[in-house]
């Protein structure tokens, strides 16, 4: 005899055929629950590189665990803007956010369902090199 439990939960989603439209007969897919939530643990590192002035580079803020959620929103909002502008057939390849000392790059896979997020020092990194690294890494997400 099955036993009922009031502590179970399920989070499901429906893939859209086109952006913003739910299929007439939706087929739900269940998200895997990890029990985790957004965290804001600051992660830092100091480079082993020694500059010409014989000092190491500044401490680098490598990211925050919560950054993925915000970058997902950046991608979603850009997709909404493209839809509003009726840019059908166009796809986002990457998104570049330039800060005073950092370059933030978001590279989407060909299907647009996954992305890689990379933060590099704008002083120490060539943009073309960072984009090449992202392209090579995106191949592994397919």
Image (tube, rainbow, N blue to C red):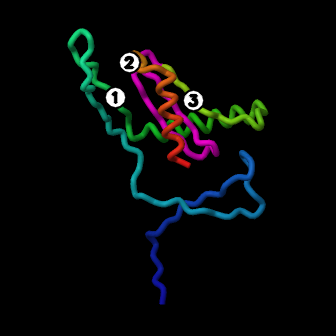
Image location of residue 123, percent across then percent down: 39, 15
Along the line of sight, which residue is nearer the eye, 116 or 8? 116
Q: Residue furthest bottom?
A: 1
Please report the residue visible at 48 percent of the width from the left and 90 percent of the height from the top. Answer: 1
* Contact (Cβ within 8 Å) of mark 1 with mark 3: no
Q: Is residue 44 left or right of residue 124?
A: left
Q: Which residue is mark 2?
A: 124
Range of magenta residues: 99-121
Q: Which residue is mark 1?
A: 61
Figure quadrant of residue 81: top right
Instruction: Give the main secondary structure, helix, strand or loop, of the magenta stretch.
Output: strand
Along the line of sight, which residue is nearer the eye, 82 or 123? 123
Judged from the image, the secondary structure of the residue bearing numbered disc 1 is strand
Judged from the image, the secondary structure of the residue bearing numbered disc 3 is strand
The image shows residue 10, relative to residue 50, as above or below, that is below
Q: Residue furthest top?
A: 53
Within 10 Å of the Cα at label 3, are there few (<14), some (14-19), or many (20+) other Cα atoms?
A: some
Please report the residue visible at 70 percent of the width from the left and 52 percent of the height from the top. Answer: 16
Mark toward the start of the polypeptide (1 vs 3): 1
Judged from the image, the secondary structure of the residue bearing numbered disc 2 is loop
Mark toward the start of the polypeptide (1 vs 2): 1
Mark toward the start of the polypeptide (2 vs 3): 3
Q: Compute the Cα span from label 2 to label 3.
A: 20 Å
Q: Which residue is mark 3?
A: 95
């Amino acid at each position: 005899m099955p036993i009922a439990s009031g502590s179970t939960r399920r989070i499901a989603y429906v893939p859209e055929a086109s952006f913003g439209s739910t299929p007439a007969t939706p087929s739900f897919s269940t998200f895997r629950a990890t029990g985790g939530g957004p965290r804001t643990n600051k992660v830092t590192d100091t480079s082993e590189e020694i500059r010409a002035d014989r000092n190491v580079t500044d401490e680098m803020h490598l990211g925050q665990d919560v950054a993925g959620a915000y970058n997902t929103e950046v991608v979603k909002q850009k997709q909404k803007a493209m839809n509003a502008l009726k840019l059908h057939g166009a796809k986002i390849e990457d998104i570049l956010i330039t800060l005073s000392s950092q370059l933030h790059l978001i590279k989407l896979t060909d299907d647009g369902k996954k992305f890689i997020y990379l933060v590099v020092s704008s002083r120490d990194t060539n943009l073309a090199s960072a984009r090449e690294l992202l392209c090579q890494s995106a191949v592994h997400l397919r």
